[in-house]
Image (cartoon, grey):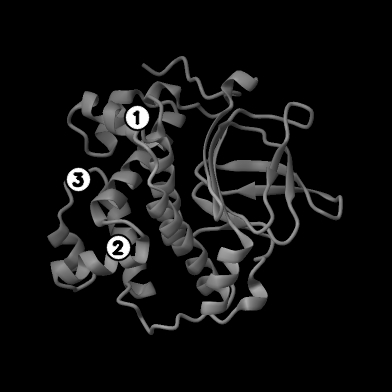
Amino acid sequence: MHSHVDIARFVNADISIAHCMLPAWQAGDFLSISNPSSIAVSFTEQRKATVQLDCGAWKDRNIPAGSFGTAGVAQIAWIRVREPSECLEVTASAVMRASIAEELRVGHQVDLDDLHGSCDPVVWSVAARLRSLLRAPARHDGIELETLVVHLYRRLLIARFGGRSPARGEGALSPIRLRSLVEWIEAHLDEDISIAQLAAVVSLSQAHFIRSFARTLGMPPHQYVRARRMQRAREELSRGASVAAAAHAVGFASVSQFRSAFRQTFGHVPRLTPQRGAREWTSKGTK
């Protein structure tokens, strides 16, 4: 089983990031621990995953695909995961977390709390960008990684822990506009999408839209649309679609271009996407 564990990491004095692609496992196969005060995004659905809390209690949790969770002051041990899983975990140092929390006037929330199963497009987009950076063959850009980690903690401290931004608005998209935009993108992933169309959805000029989008989601519009297309394609593959069908479902006319984009995003070719019920990341029936 260990030969199918695939983890990409970046660690420095202030941040630790791990992108993990794991087979199904249970206690005794190997140990998986969520770091204290960490943020994790699950790119795959997990049904009745069993965790052990600091008090020793075992709990079954249903983890929706695309959802995030946070660990509080204590670590969380994952005892059993019934299906192949892909997740990204981010941990900021105590010094970095304190700086962010104090700026947002929630210093008492510096250690976060035990949350799971929530969805947020900003959290997902930052995690998707971190995943792409970790899986890219080029040398990691520590500055961009640290900037994204700060953005991620700021988003959660404001959205979930009562933080208040010192700069009102900061030029970001409002929650209503963001929700409308995300819903529109999801409905048009199989089509050509232009900046003009996206800007029109939220009634902004193209230049204003590009700035606001990046401030909100941590990446420019084209990167987000590409990330969502790749995620949709992976979902199609996990349900048994062929590579050609998955490519068509997200608007790629060329299968070779799709394969290249997929590998750039995930660090592996499409046929290594697991199908539902598989115990490892290799899906032998997908060509």
Quarter of the image where the N terminus is located: top right
Q: Report the Cα–Cα distance between label 3 and label 2.
A: 22 Å
Residue 80 appearing in the image: yes
Q: Residue at x 31, y 71 (%)?
A: 177
Q: Judge depth for marks 3 and 2 and give the one in front.
A: 2
Q: Position of residue 282 (x, y in %)?
A: 50, 20
The mark that comes first in sequence, 3 or 1, is: 3
Q: Residue at x 34, y 45 (%)?
A: 227
Q: Which residue is mark 1?
A: 263
Q: Amino acid at mark 3?
A: Glu
The mark that comes first in sequence, 3 or 2, is: 3
Quarter of the image where the C terminus is located: top left
* Helix, strand or loop under label 1: helix
For label 1, the crowd category at 10 Å Cα-Cα, with few meaning under 14, some 14 to 19 and many 20 or more, is some
Quarter where residue 83 is shown:
top right
Q: Position of residue 221 (x, y in %)?
A: 25, 56
